[in-house]
Image (spheres, rainbow, N blue to C red):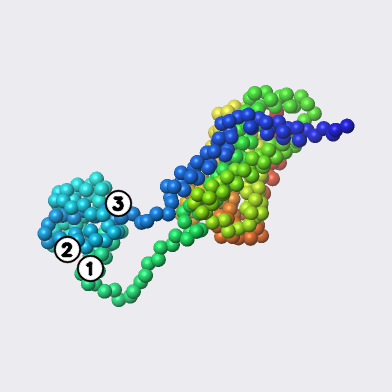
Amino acid sequence: MKRYSPNWELFLCRMRMFYREPEAIFWTYGFPVLLTIGLGVAFRTKPPDKVQVAIEGARVLSDIRRTLEDDPAFQTFVGSAAQCEAWIRKGEAAVAIVYGEGIEYHADPTRPEAALARLKVDEAIQRAAGRSDAVGIKSVEVTARGARYIDFLIPGLVGMNLMGGGLWGIGFVTVDMRIRKLLKRLVATPMRKRDFFLSLIGSRMVFTVPEMLLLLLTGWMLFRVAIEGSWLAIAVVAGVGALSFAGLGLFLASRARKIETISGLMNAVMLPMWIFSGIFFSSKRFPDVLQPFIQALPLTQLNNALRAVITDGASLASQGVPLLILAAYGLVSFVLALRYFRWT
């Protein structure tokens, strides 16, 4: 006689429910890939932007005009003094060169790029006039794999997707089942909370594998994102992160009875991590006074560990502290969910 396993049956049920919802498949697999492609194209490696310079068409400025026009680093606009001022006001030029009481640089001091543009223009003009530097310094552009923005971005997107999958894929689904009275039917059977939770977490872990592979392979195939660490280390870090957010999702859904309630709870939990946890830019940009709070967020630890393994090739053993923090979040949340969960 075949032994009945409630955990296995619930797991199969959850898998069938997922694949019968096309919108769930798109938001789980399609949207992260499209986001990766869009951001990868937007922040692709490309030549530096040209410095836009407006030059008054005065004869005394003709030598300066020829110097900048011959330099591929600059894009020049020539017009009257009034036109140059208009180009500055409209933001169409970063700096204007006009002839008043001598040669004058005009720029808007409130624009961050204006000061840099003025320095570049002045350097080009002074060098053309024969200035020699006391110390020779060579500039080197760093565009190697692993040092680009896209290499920084991909691990952050993987972490963001693991967070969203754990919270929405478990928390939202659980509350939706409660609203549709599906949990009420399950409680009528000899169903244990533990079996129900493990089935949800098991299905979430299955979905995590293609999610992670799609993002990493998309980054590698389209943008040659460097994957320096071992796939085993990446899988362990992602797995612990997925379990951590799955536990949080269960805890948030343990009492919620309305879609509005669970949506508000999940947004309240995810919003600080979207902002502070270093998905799109480094969390170190925030003030030091906020760093203890930021480092305590689970997504911060997950992103730090993913970047260390994927980009820097760090070993799994070196990521013990982030993994312990993630495991603590997941374990405590799971225990609290068992304590406070209600079927109806």
Cα distance between the residues tagged 3 and 1 = 27 Å
Query: Which residue is more in the foreground, 214 or 297?
Result: 214
Q: Is residue 217 left or right of residue 120?
A: right
- Residue furthest out toward the right: 1
Q: Amino acid at mark 1?
A: Ala
Q: Which residue is mark 2?
A: 63
Query: Which residue is more in the foreground, 301 or 77?
Result: 77
The correct choice, above or below, for 178 with respect to 30 in the image is above
Q: Residue sitting at 42 percent across and 54 percent down?
A: 45
Query: Which residue is more in the foreground, 195 or 339?
Result: 195
Q: Residue sitting at 46 percent across and 54 percent down?
A: 149
Residue 27 locus on image (x, y percent): 55, 36
Residue 37 locus on image (x, y percent): 48, 45
Q: Which image quadrant: the C terminus? A: top right
Element under disc 2: helix
Q: Is residue 126 left or right of residue 210?
A: left
Q: Which image quadrant: the N terminus? A: top right
Q: Amino acid at mark 3?
A: Arg
Residue count near mark 2 (Cα–Cα under 10 Å), binned few <14, some 14–19, many ≥20: few
Q: Residue sitting at 59 percent across and 50 percent down?
A: 302
Residue 327 locus on image (x, y percent): 67, 49
Q: Is residue 256 visible?
A: no
Residues at marks 2 and 3 touching, judged by CB atoms closer than 8 Å: no
Cα distance between the residues tagged 2 and 1 = 9 Å
Residue 275 locus on image (x, y percent): 49, 45
Q: Is residue 258 left or right of residue 6?
A: left
Q: Which residue is mark 3?
A: 111
Cα distance between the residues tagged 2 and 3 = 27 Å
The correct choice, above or below, for 120 with respect to 340 in the image is below
